[in-house]
Image (cartoon, grey):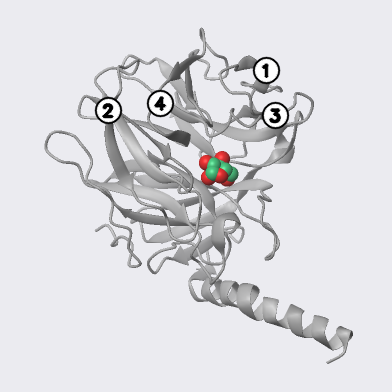
Amino acid sequence: MTFYNKSIAQVTMKILKYILPLLLTGYLNTAKAANPADTIIHSNGNPIIRHEYTADPAAMVYKGKVYLYTGHDQAPANQNGYVMHNWTCFTSSDMVTWTEHSSPLNVKDFAWAKADAWASQVIERNGKFYWYVAVEHGTIPGKAIGVAVSDSPLGPFKDARGSALITNDMTKAMKHPWDDIDPSVIIDKDGQAYLFWGNGICYYAKLKPNMTELDGEIKTITLPHYTEAPWIHQRNGWYYLSYAYEFPEKIAYAMSRNINGPWVYKGIINELAGNSNTNHQAIIDFKGKSYFIYHNGALVPDAGSFHRSVCIDYLYYNTDGSIKRVVMTSEGVKKVK
Ligand code: FUB
């Protein structure tokens, strides 16, 4: 075989191995929505989205719907590294039928940022929606956290500050420049909002009522084998801080009666996710059930750590409030009646 023929054969093999399965699985579970910019997806088990790669899920329940915000793995098939330019939004009233809304946020919406649409989370306050995102800062070396705002959970979102909320020079606990990633946000019962984030260590700080400025010092929380991806949620008088544990990542959690701790480490919730170094969870309650939303690298053979896909399984609590280990399934969750 000549060199030329060999290259054609290699390219053909790559198309058959990576791109064709993605196109086929995507085609089979999508349809056009009422709004031409939107697409209806009938998820058929895990991963729930099959026509593109989705990562770093964050979910919000608002007015009877789940809003699922994800990152978007866009690396070429053979590239082992994150290529992520935008975030996207899917909504569902039954956890099985999802509508994908036209990409509501891009790194370019933050003039001060230069790359990397990494993990994010949206929260509502007083009818406005705040989208906290991790990106690479354009002039201050390292990752940074920005916040965009909108009057609708579907956008359009715009940079709320015109500058980063957190930059690498504001946090000193870790020497590496990517410690300011993975924002998670909560509004406590008394109206006080908190931002949690961090790689290598978990940082947290109060937010002012405007949701776009810190209110006081940045503190740290010590958690066993903490890697990244904090997710803060509250339920029946307990605060839960789940996070990526070790690397490759499992998901573990700690509980506290007070958002300022002390946090009691409770153990692993989720094992390594199939074919991905990262796992990145979101936890919500919706219409009487609890859900564990995460990503794996199992959409197509060899998808892996840089071509991830969002999955959803049930999460169950024990009567004392502790969390049972998640069973990751291919079937996923059932349609909510
Ligand atoms: O998607 C980029 C990074 O991978 C996220 O910020 C981490 O949580 C991990 O999922």
Which x, y percent locates residue 304?
55, 61
Q: Up-down: is 182 above or below 31?
A: above
Identify which amino acid the numbered label 2 is placed on.
Answer: Met
Identify which amino acid the numbered label 3 is placed on.
Answer: Gly
**Which structural element holds mark 2?**
strand
Task: Measure how far apart labels 1 and 4 are at the Cα level.
Answer: 24 Å
Quick one: which residue is furthest to the bottom in this view? 1
Residue at the spot of label 2: 255
**Which structural element holds mark 1?**
helix
The answer to whether residue 22 is seen in the rendering is yes
**Which structural element holds mark 4?**
strand
Task: Measure how far apart labels 1 and 3 are at the Cα level.
Answer: 8 Å
Identify which amino acid the numbered label 1 is placed on.
Answer: Asp
The answer to whether the residue bearing label 2 lies less than 8 angstroms from the nearest atom of ligand 1 is no
Residue at the spot of label 3: 142
Give whichever of 203, 222 is nearer the camera. Answer: 222
